[in-house]
Amino acid sequence: MDGEELTAQETALYDRQIRVWGANAQRRLTKSHILVSGIKGTVTEFCKNIVLAGVGSVTLMDDNLVNEESLNANFLIPPDENAYRGKTVAEICCDSLKDFNPMVLVSVEKGDLSTRSTEFFEKFDVVVIGYGSLATKKAVNEKCRKLSKRVAFYTVDCRDSCGEIFVDLQDYKYTKKKLEEKVECELNFPSFQEAVSVPWKPIPRRTAKLYFAMRVIEVFEENEGRKHGECSLLDLPTVLEIKKKLCEANSVSESHIPDSLLERLITGTIEFPPVCAIVGGILAQEVIKAVSGKGEPLKNFFYYDAQDGKGVMEDISNSFTS
């Protein structure tokens, strides 16, 4: 991914960024290839930020046709119905992103991400799944881990005014400053499967409630065959029953997951633009750090809830049980 030196045009365009993180970091960014699947409000913010930062290419996957619901929080879709009629979300967003930075190659890949072979992911440096099913996130993460090269893997999900980011950088080395000196550091990340399968009882009580609540929603959607956001208040009894079973299986109290939080997650199907901007911005920041090798990365979950205005990082791994 190091590749050749920056061109004169790239150096001029990204001058201010180069002053912040250096020419080598910018060079890595301009040679990086990002795959993004599932494009709603938060992912839209993410795409805008990494295109402006100057990554090499962004490949979009979202075959859903643009409709009125798509317009919510997705500023890349023009309000004129004639402009998007008959087009997919990925196609419309692709056209808009090209205007943000013509030096970034933005393209569309059609098809189902979950059916792609392991070799398909080899041409990317970063894979981001937005609003994916539990099965898709597990399967794609495992395919990325089977490759000979390290592919940074992220998932992002926003419901109501809450957001979750998951990060898997596998065995990751980076540099950070400590007392004006550069220090070489290394972190070992668990896979998505490992991170969501950690027994709940050893996890500290102070851990964000959203971690547990999101696992309940994932199981509900998988059991019921629902896509992201295909739920309502009528589903609350079923969701609460799943919560009860998961808490019993993990030997923890049901108070671990407030019913009110689960109700928010299944009824709040519309994204809030301010939350999209915050979570999408954090995700873009983390991808830039991972690609450039500059700065300490998030490990391995990030949660944001607009009700208290707090963003928290949670390191969820099997270390709790060892």
Image (cartoon, rainbow, N blue to C red):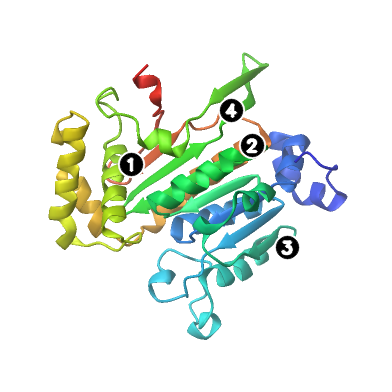
Whether residue 22 is situated above or below residue 273 in the rendered picture: above
- According to the image, label 3 marks what residue? 102
Quadrant, the C terminus: top left
Q: Position of residue 141 (x, y in %)?
A: 51, 43
Categorize mark 3 by other alpha carbons within 10 Å: few (<14), some (14-19), many (20+). few
Q: CA distance from mark 3 to mark 1?
A: 35 Å
Q: CA distance from mark 1 to mark 2?
A: 34 Å
Q: Position of residue 69 (x, y in %)?
A: 38, 71
Q: CA distance from mark 2 to mark 3?
A: 28 Å
Q: CA distance from mark 3 to mark 4?
A: 33 Å
Judge by depth and name the residue closer to the eye, 168 or 83. 168
> At numbered mark 2, what does the secondary structure look like: helix, strand or loop?
loop
Earlier in the chain: of badge 4 and badge 1, it is 4
Amino acid marked by disc 1: Gly
- According to the image, label 4 marks what residue? 171
Residue 27's image quarter? top right
- According to the image, label 1 marks what residue? 309
Earlier in the chain: of badge 3 and badge 4, it is 3
- According to the image, label 2 marks what residue? 150
Categorize mark 1 by other alpha carbons within 10 Å: few (<14), some (14-19), many (20+). few
> At numbered mark 1, what does the secondary structure look like: helix, strand or loop?
loop
Judge by depth and name the residue closer to the eye, 87 or 296. 87
227 lies left or right of 28: left
Q: CA distance from mark 2 to mark 4?
A: 8 Å
174 lies left or right of 160: right
